[in-house]
Image (cartoon, grey):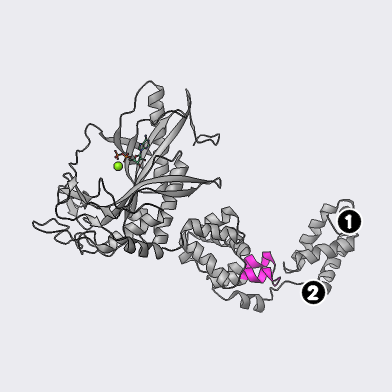
Amino acid sequence: MSSNGSKYIQGSTGPWEIVIGLEVHAQILSNAKLFSGAATEFGAEPNSQVSFVDAAMPGMLPVINKKCVEQAVRTGLGLKAKINLFSVFDRKNYFYPDLPQGYQISQYKSPVVGEGEVLIDLPNGETARVGIERLHMEQDAGKSLHDQHPDHSYVDLNRSGVALMEIVSRPDMRSSEEAAAFLKKLRAIVRYLGTCDGNMDEGSMRADVNVSVRKPGAPLGTRCEIKNVNSVRFVGQAIEYEARRQVDILESGGTITQETRLFDSRAGETRSMRSKEEAHDYRYFPDPDLLPLVLEQAWVDNIAASLPELPDEKRARFIAMGLSAYDATVLVAEKESADYFEAMLAAGADAKASANWLNNEYFGRLNKAGLAISDGPVAAAANSAIVQMVSGGVISGKIAKDVLDIVWAEGSDPRTIVESRGLKQVTDTDAIETAVDAVIAANPDKVAAAQAKPQMVGWFVGQVMKSTGGKANPASVNAILKKRLGLPEEG
Ligand code: ADP
Ligand code: MG
């Protein structure tokens, strides 16, 4: 983005606004394909999950998979969208070696899900709304393999017929950060719902990125569509590159031609694939092998009643418990983090203290070790016990970090560690007084300095904490020091 923090690009003729709309393909979580019973597992032997329907053998008929429809409806409800009780499957006709039918079954004029919305959480703490235009179901194509043989290409039809949801946003995003936030939020929502695993590196989620630029307040500019971008980071890079490219063309007197482009992640640039003139005419028509899809409102209502708590609602509930908006946003971003946090509360820890502890200590250690929360070595109950020992004055905040390190490395129970290694906080006034007196006696020069400059007391606190192995209660140390040095109690 521009260095002044605004979301405009600075060109030689002044600021330009970026306009972005995304078309996200999300693979439906289902054991079988959209119109066949073949399996959908990732990473299987090529062509081991292909039914006669997926291979488009003559005379085969598609049969709709109810589970896939349920997943699409569930996703629509999660996007607060209108569910269309009547929708139609169309044939989208084109030739491609990995598309044996010669057409893709998709939904065109009558999609199963209509308008909805996604609220996105921006890095500056603000929330923005991105409109959803529609969600429709369609088949995925197979995959051509060009790297298996020097002279031949092979085709793997395992993905052929796999159910996808295409989720189309309104052109409501204005920066690469907003587009990244949208993708992350959408991914979180489908993961909470269990309708897509959201694994972009396995191709379960990929985005077509539409980008245009305009002078602030001007009508929408001509867009280019960057196909099949497969990571959040690449989406950001593709937008930055593409917007700059368009601004440069417009400022040197050129015009943007609507076209399809691809993102070369190695070069970090977008390149033309085909112009609008070369665009396919897909000759959409309703698939004669399939009846219109008619849903019953009661069936939709049942799905609605079974929806889990979604990130926005969870975030609101966490804020009501006293968490900051920032902490709540971080915790709900991944369902596993939110569940972990709630497990800490269920084990007895305070909400705010637990959120602080996770965001300041535990998540940092997980990041550093490159571990997902589900692979972390410390159980929620153990972190809960550490937080409770701090709140209860059993250990100091400093010792708590050491205890976490020990539990991390050794996997033992934090209360046992504190007990057996004598890490309990010293609140016994006699013991602290003894330690304070020893430090004062050893540093007569510093005593005079502290009496002249009361901020010096911090140095004494540090010495006493050191001599007690970090176990003295810092508030007691402070109070006793001030009394012994003859300093005022407050300030
Ligand atoms: P088409 O039917 O040609 O695919 P759509 O109107 O469905 O076009 O839009 C496809 C995507 O492009 C949507 O995500 C939409 O938000 C986005 N889009 C439309 N117009 C613009 C524009 N001027 N700039 C950026 N994105 C746009
Ligand atoms: Mg479209």
- Characterize the magenta stretch by its predominant secondary structure: helix
**Residue corresponding to mark 1:** 445
Which picture quadrant has residue 388? bottom right
Label 2: state its secondary structure: loop
Ligand 1's image quarter is top left
| Residue 190 is a magenta residue | no
User: Quick check: is the Cβ at mark 1 less than 8 Å away from ligand 1?
Assistant: no
- Inspect the image, locate mark 1, and give the three-letter code of the amino acid beneath it: Asp
Residue 409 appears in the figure = no
Instruction: Mark 2: give few (<14), some (14-19) or many (20+) Cα within 10 Å.
Output: few
- Inspect the image, locate mark 2, and give the three-letter code of the amino acid beneath it: Asp
Q: Position of residue 398 (x, y in %)?
A: 68, 64
Instruction: Mark 1: give few (<14), some (14-19) or many (20+) Cα within 10 Å.
Output: few
**Residue corresponding to mark 2:** 428
* Up-down relation of residue 237 to residue 465 (above or below): above
Which picture quadrant has residue 435? bottom right
Q: Which portion, as a residue range, is magenta? A: 386-402
Q: Position of residue 212 (x, y in %)?
A: 38, 33
Residue 38 appears in the figure = yes
Closer to the observer: label 1 or label 2? Answer: 2
Looking at this view, is 398 or 71 the one in front? 71
Which residue is drawn at the image coordinates 10% and 57% (left, top)? Answer: 57
User: In the image as oriented, which residue stretches furthest toward the left?
Assistant: 58
Which residue is drawn at the image coordinates 42% and 42% (left, top)? Answer: 236
User: In the image as oriented, which residue stretches furthest toward the top?
Assistant: 253
Q: Position of residue 178 (x, y in %)?
A: 46, 43
Mark closer to the chain start, 1 or 2: 2
Separation (CA) of disc 1 from disc 2: 28 Å
Looking at this view, is 66 or 16 the one in front? 66
